[in-house]
Image: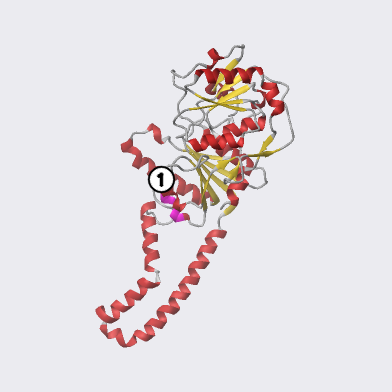
Amino acid sequence: MATKSSGMTMREHQLSKELERIRSTYSFNLGLLLTEAFVRKPWKLPLLPFSFIKLNLDFLKNRKATKKEIEERITSLDSNCLLLFSTSEEGVSSLERCSVLARQWLEEDERKVVIITSQPELSTIVPRSAIVYPLTDPKEISKDQRGGWNARCEQLLSNVLETHRPGNVLFDGPYPYRGVLNCMPLNEAISWYWIRPEGVKDGAVAARSSEFTSIVEFGFSSDFGVQLVEPTSNHVQADLKKEILDGRSYGSRSPPKPTKTRLQELVETSVNFVELEQWYNSNDGLLHNRETPRLLAAVLPPNLEAISVMMETNVPTLCIYNDDVDAGTIRKIREGSQRNAILFAHENDEVQCKLALNSLVNEHQTMRRASRPVKKRSWINQILSNG
């Protein structure tokens, strides 16, 4: 885990820089001067006035040199390069968000995207032109090996930063890894963004955010860092499949529990339910997929970006939630989808789920025509404008 320049580990390099910073402060050098004159080398006391003047001149000179060094470090960054760090704690949703941001970034020529991810599902989700660095899933290793994993994460990230010199880094995950936090103070010229679609609810986790330029929160209005959608002209899909996407496990690492209600048993009409895993086997994700508008309907958890895609493609949707879901998230979705074909039901209320599902199946065209048309806004431009 050595750096290219000195052979030191990242931690040693970090401590070395901190020691260098302390030694360069005015208070440290003034204290050193007075200690030498009054304690260690009393014969220098008569020269103290001249030494004091020299100390101030040297300090001003060094401050100008430091400022110039920081400016050179900033200009050496590649403003056309974007680094995305995708995690695995929330299933494939993190990688899909990063994929959307990557595609939007690459819409302009000469831009480059680098992605670090612990997700194995890459080929159909990530843009082909993206440079991808795979990372072992931290959830697949034991707790006593996490220290070694963070060291490897730190090494990989530091090497990527040195190689590609990105101007902006976007970390998408429920909590920052220690390997990421260790790299941030060594690259203060870079703008670091932490993507949290539903905000940071845990105070202990929020305390780790001080190093980030901004925490990015998603929403349906301008009150949030990223406004997911905006009004557009009306569009009703004509060529529909008799398929309903069962995406209840979206944003989760594990599939629905066997005890969860079988949706097929609640629908009175013959329709085909497509499980999320089956959907991914035949399509290129959920947030970026040409087949999504052809769905008859969708069943999703209260996931902001997934719901926004159904609003954008005008697919009637049942949002199924449980007691573990943050009330603020449900409120945010309800307020933002008041004029769209979005219904809500608690997963333990089978009657409510049945009524909502049959409404989607029987009235989906009416719901489409009455729905307020929206289109996706550019997420990446809004994120970087918050820096």
Q: Position of residue 142 (x, y in %)?
A: 33, 34
Q: Residue at label 1?
A: 203
Q: Quadrant of residue 289?
A: top right
From the viewer's perspective, is 270 left or right of 186?
right
Q: Quadrant of residue 352?
A: top right
Q: Quadrant of residue 137?
A: top left
Residue visible at 68% across and 25% down? 367
Residue visible at 46% across and 46% down? 157
Q: Position of residue 222 (x, y in %)?
A: 61, 46
Q: Position of residue 30 (x, y in %)?
A: 36, 76
From the viewer's perspective, is 184 left or right of 104?
left
From the viewer's perspective, is 28 left or right of 296?
left
Question: Colour scheme in the image?
Answer: secondary structure
Reply above or below: 143 against 383: above
Predominant secondary structure in magenta? helix
Residue 198 lies within the magenta run: no
Q: Nearer the viewer, residue 145 or 346?
A: 346
Q: How many marks?
A: 1
The amino acid marked with disc number 1 is Gly
Reply above or below: 264 against 8: above
Reply above or below: 261 against 129: above
Residue visible at 57% across and 59% down? 75
Q: Is residue 369 visible?
A: yes
Magenta residues (range)? 181-186
Q: Is residue 154 visible?
A: no
Q: Position of residue 386 (x, y in %)?
A: 57, 51
Circle 1 Cα neighbour tier, 10 Å, few/some/many (<14 / 14–19 / ≥20):
few
From the viewer's perspective, is 53 left or right of 331?
left
Give the farthest residue toward the bottom. 46
Residue 183 lies within the magenta run: yes
Query: Helix, strand, or loop for circle 1?
Result: helix
